[in-house]
Amino acid sequence: MMYAEIIGWGKCAPPAILTNNDIATFMDTSDEWIVSRTGIKQRHISHVPCSELARVATERAISCSGIDAKDIDLIIFGSNTPNEMVPNCASKIVNAVGATNATGFDLNSACTSFLYALNVGTDMIKAGSIKTAVVIGMEKTSRLMDWGKRDSAILFGDGGGAVVLQATEKELGLIDAKLNLVPNTREMLSLPGFGMDMADEDYKTYYSSLNFDGQEIFKHAVRGMQEACNDLLSRTGVTQDEIELFVPHQANRRIIETLAKRMKFDLDKVVICVDKYANTSAGTIPLALCDALEEGRITAGMTMLTASFGAGLTCGAGLIKWGERTKPLEDSEAELPPCNQTALEIIQPSIDSAKKHYESK
């Protein structure tokens, strides 16, 4: 039987940082209020399209793996925030990194996009369809934020990462996954009137505003991830004590801590980086993986559990067996174009749009 080892990894967080104090300059909030409720201290704001963030993360992952881009068979771009609806964003990344023998497609399952894409890429390798794949989780959520809504605007940030998968006969990589959809929860987290539904809207007056039912999302997120984790562990015969590292979706520190407590994981076994990046949606798990590797928290042969949830409401869990290598084979020179604006300056047009929208109501 074939498996799909993670042989390369790379992240990209844009340089402009928006602190809680920055947000407090135009919104009725404070650093203390945000940190106490979410654990978030800052978020990165991108000056470039999502595809450019993905290009950098992918090039870094390729360098880390030591392979040639021409050896890649498939690139899966997991995201809610592609540059455009048509063509897919994956094709842009395929061209940008020189993966001339690869095909590619986008996958949108909200915040669970990376986990779902990792499962798809792994299964294609297990089936023998391909040998090498890149799986990306990347977002530019700041472009869609309603900066007049405190409950949701404070939560999100830009960035993400990518991993390289390669066929192996060793039992490594994503060993198994449990993916779920919670019935009748679509409206709890949604961006209405977008996509083809916008055909019924006045394009000139359309205003992007996220529907976000925080209390219900919290409840379903914790329950959904816990059930997915327990089902997966039961199916694979792995006990909770055998899990050496837990890498959950970084939506909110309260959610992470509540889930860890229910799963009986000590926090020193849990990767938490939501304070640095906020919720980067599909980007949180690859960012957390890269940070854990940089910090030396992932060791050869480690058994890991990951879990995620997102709009839909979708949720899932994945059991990962790490390989021997925890250091990049090659350093990458991939970088974003220079940023000449502060985070506040980048989002100022959106802040002005929010102000105008709410003043007209």
Image (cartoon, rainbow, N blue to C red):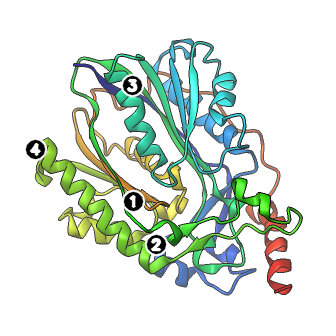
Query: What label does residue 272 carry, if any?
Result: 1
Note whether residue 241 is visible: yes
Q: Which residue: 36% across, 30% down?
A: 122
Q: Nearer the viewer, mark 1 or mark 3?
A: 3
Q: Nearer the viewer, mark 2 or mark 3?
A: 3
Mark 3 neighbour density, 10 Å: few (under 14) some (14–19) many (20 or more)? some
Note whether residue 290 is visible: no
Task: Tell me if label 4 and label 3 are in contact, CB under 8 Å.
Answer: no
Q: Which residue is mark 3?
A: 124
Q: Nearer the viewer, mark 1 or mark 4?
A: 4
Closer to the chain start, of discs 2 and 1, is 2
Q: Which residue: 27% across, 55% down?
A: 228
Mark 1 neighbour density, 10 Å: few (under 14) some (14–19) many (20 or more)? many
Tag 3: residue type?
Met
Tag 2: residue type?
Gly
Query: What label does residue 39 carry, if any?
Result: 2
Closer to the chain start, of discs 4 and 2, is 2
- Residue 226 against residue 180 in the figure, above or below: below
Closer to the chain start, of discs 1 and 4, is 4
Task: Tell me if label 2 and label 1 are in contact, CB under 8 Å.
Answer: yes
Residue at the front extreme of this rendering: 200
- Residue 167 against residue 250 in the figure, above or below: above
Who is closer to the viewer here, 214 or 343?
A: 214
Q: Which residue is mark 4?
A: 237
Q: Nearer the viewer, mark 4 or mark 2?
A: 4
Q: Where residue 277 sits: x, y (%)?
A: 54, 58
Element at badge 4?
A: loop
Give the alpha-carbon distance from disc 1 to disc 4, as whole Å. Answer: 26 Å
Q: Is residue 174 left or right of residue 264?
A: right
- Residue 274 against residue 169 in the figure, above or below: below
Closer to the chain start, of discs 4 and 3, is 3
Q: Where residue 251 sits: x, y (%)?
A: 46, 64
